[in-house]
Amino acid sequence: MRTVLIAATLSFTALLATSCSDRSFPTAPAAVSVAAPLSALVSDRPYTWQVTCSSHNALYGTLGVDVSWVWLSGGVAIAGTSRSVVCHPDVATTLTGSEVRPAAADGFFASVGWPIPNTKTWTFDPSGSFKALLKGASVQTIYDFTSSYQLKSSGTLKVDS
């Protein structure tokens, strides 16, 4: 009985081996290649920024203009990409710099001015170029015993990537 069982097992194994090597035997379809996500095809790219400011009340002194920005991915801030500068018209009317825009960035948020800043959010194609321009103002009211006056400075942020 054992010999018959061994012979039957060997016959089945030979049949199975022959069937698997037969090219006409049905097999599973080959795996289809899935395209890489767009962010994998896009790399980090440099960008430049420029902040300019001017004062409207040099007689009473100047007020700095607060400017900040951050790169976004899917509407969420990308860690480590937040920047903030204060432009003081009596110190330097133009500040510039260059940094790296992350490959995952598909949006940009910026704020210019104080205490009520002008803000804007942009969305863009990560594989393309990006430019932003945002203007705002900083305003502070000064009171003394007999009068009040406002310090006002204007600022502009330009980004080019």
Image (spheres, rainbow, N blue to C red):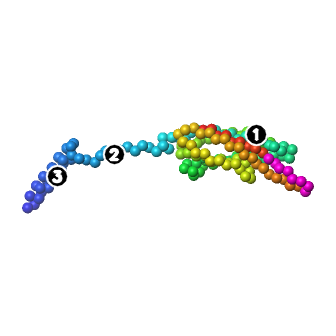
Looking at the image, residue 105 lies above or below residue 145 = above
Please report the bounds of the magenta region as a residue range: 145-152
Looking at the image, residue 54 lies above or below residue 2 = above
Quadrant occupied by the N terminus: bottom left
Does residue 6 show up? yes
Is 147 situated left or right of 95 in this image?
right
| Callouts 3 and 1 close, C-beta under 8 Å | no
Label 3 CA crowd tier, 10 Å (few <14, some 14–19, many 20+):
few
- Residue pictured at 91% horizontal, 55% vertical: 146
Numbered badge on residue 13: 3
- Residue pictured at 29% horizontal, 46% vertical: 29
Numbered badge on residue 31: 2
Q: Magenta includes 147?
A: yes
Q: Earlier in the sequence, mark 2 or mark 3?
A: 3
By secondary structure, the bulk of the magenta-drawn segment is best described as strand
Q: Magenta includes 51?
A: no
Label 2 CA crowd tier, 10 Å (few <14, some 14–19, many 20+):
few
Q: Position of residue 35 (x, y in %)?
A: 42, 43
